[in-house]
Image (tube, helix red, strand yellow):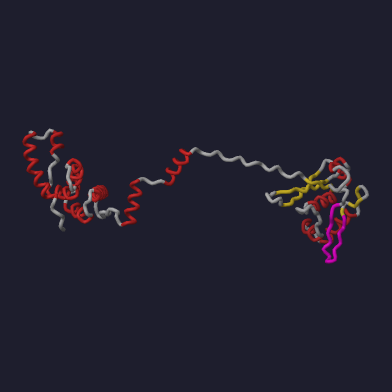
């Protein structure tokens, strides 16, 4: 503070502040005007006519971030919405009034004619405001490993079916759409096609069988295939669909169909046909 008197004895105090402090020690300067109780108790408020008080307060509104308050006559005239002549009359009237032996306004003539006016020294004290306390950032709570993994999987992971479908589309392995079919039938054929090709059957053979045979018959043979014990599942499956094979003997025994001896004899004959058919390669 440059003034010898205590700041509280002045009607106005200009606080110089350091805002947006950075780690390298730099900051953005700022200045704030503080109206002190002395404006009321020192008698200045009561002694000044309303128009002069209005003009004095208006001058302080031009306070710059560096703490200077030096509005030009043109700026004051525009703020008052009067001509420069009327504005000059008002500010000169304040400049002619003294407070504690000092004019309320100081005229600052300039060679370019842009005269300015500054508040008198008896009105204003200056002081440095303490720098703002840097708040310490509170680190956010961290989740455990399990929570992080679960969140990552839920957000980014895909199911096996989605991944297989994506890879199939990229590599040209995706099942056909079976356009023109009933939606339920098309979905069933897509599942059957995948099961047939997963068993090792060529795509062309699987599509041919699905085109020539009823979907229910194909699904039935697919369901029975694990119980066949075939050495070559793809060939056996094709022969079973072509020949309309019965259920495997083990499944028929479980369902109690016929006499066990008749089943063994019939299945033995049928199994021979199936085994022979399973070794026959597909031809389109």
Instruction: Work out whether residue 190 or residue 197 is closer to the camera in this orientation and state it.
Output: 197
Picture quadrant where residue 223 is located: top left
Instruction: Work out whether residue 30 or residue 34 is closer to the camera in this orientation and state it.
Output: 30
Q: Residue furthest right?
A: 101
The structure residue drawn at horizontal position 87% and vertical position 55%, both measured from the top left corner, is 106
The structure residue drawn at horizontal position 21% and vertical position 52%, both measured from the top left corner, is 201
The structure residue drawn at horizontal position 29% and vertical position 55%, both measured from the top left corner, is 173
- Residue 111 covered by magenta stretch: yes
Answer left or right for 224 relative to 107. left
Q: Is residue 17 visible?
A: yes
Q: Residue furthest front?
A: 231
Instruction: Work out whether residue 278 or residue 105 is closer to the camera in this orientation and state it.
Output: 278
Residue 57 position, x and y percent, is: 81, 50
Query: Over which residues does the magenta segment extend?
Result: 106-119
Quadrant location of the C terminus in the rendered image? bottom left
- Residue 34 covered by magenta stretch: no
Q: Is residue 182 visible?
A: no
The structure residue drawn at horizontal position 32% and vertical position 53%, both measured from the top left corner, is 168
Residue 117 position, x and y percent, is: 84, 57
Q: How many marks?
A: 0
Answer left or right for 131 relative to 163. right
Answer left or right for 249 relative to 171. left
Residue 225 position, x and y percent, is: 19, 43
Q: Is residue 122 above or below residue 115?
A: above
Instruction: Work out whether residue 106 or residue 273 is closer to the camera in this orientation and state it.
Output: 273
Residue 262 position, x and y percent, is: 6, 36
Answer left or right for 117 relative to 224. right
């Amino acid at each position: 503070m440059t003034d010898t008197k205590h700041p509280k004895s002045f009607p106005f105090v200009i606080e110089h502040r350091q805002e947006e402090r950075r780690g390298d020690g730099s900051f953005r300067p700022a200045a704030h005007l503080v109206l002190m109780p002395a404006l009321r108790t020192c008698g200045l408020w009561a002694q000044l006519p309303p128009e002069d008080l209005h003009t004095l307060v208006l001058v302080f509104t031009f306070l710059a971030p560096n703490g200077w308050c030096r509005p030009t006559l043109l700026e004051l005239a525009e703020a008052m919405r009067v001509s420069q002549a009327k504005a000059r009359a008002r500010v000169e009237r304040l400049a002619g009034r003294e407070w504690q032996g000092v004019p309320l306004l100081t005229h600052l003539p300039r060679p370019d004619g842009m005269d300015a006016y500054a508040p008198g020294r008896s009105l204003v004290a200056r002081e440095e405001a303490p720098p703002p306390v840097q708040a310490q950032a509170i680190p956010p709570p961290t989740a455990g490993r399990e929570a992080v993994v679960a969140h990552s999987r839920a957000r980014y992971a895909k199911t096996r079916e989605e991944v297989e479908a994506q890879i199939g589309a990229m590599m040209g392995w995706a099942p056909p759409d079976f356009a023109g079919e009933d939606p339920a039938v098309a979905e069933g054929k897509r599942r059957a096609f995948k099961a047939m090709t997963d068993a090792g059957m060529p795509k062309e053979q699987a599509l041919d069988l699905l085109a020539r045979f009823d979907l229910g018959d194909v699904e039935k043979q697919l369901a029975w295939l694990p119980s066949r014990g075939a050495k070559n599942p793809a060939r056996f499956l094709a022969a079973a669909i072509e020949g309309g094979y019965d259920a495997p003997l083990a499944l028929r025994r479980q369902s109690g169909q016929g006499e066990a001896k008749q089943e063994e004899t019939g299945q033995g004959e049928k199994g021979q046909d199936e085994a022979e058919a399973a070794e026959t390669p597909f031809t389109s």
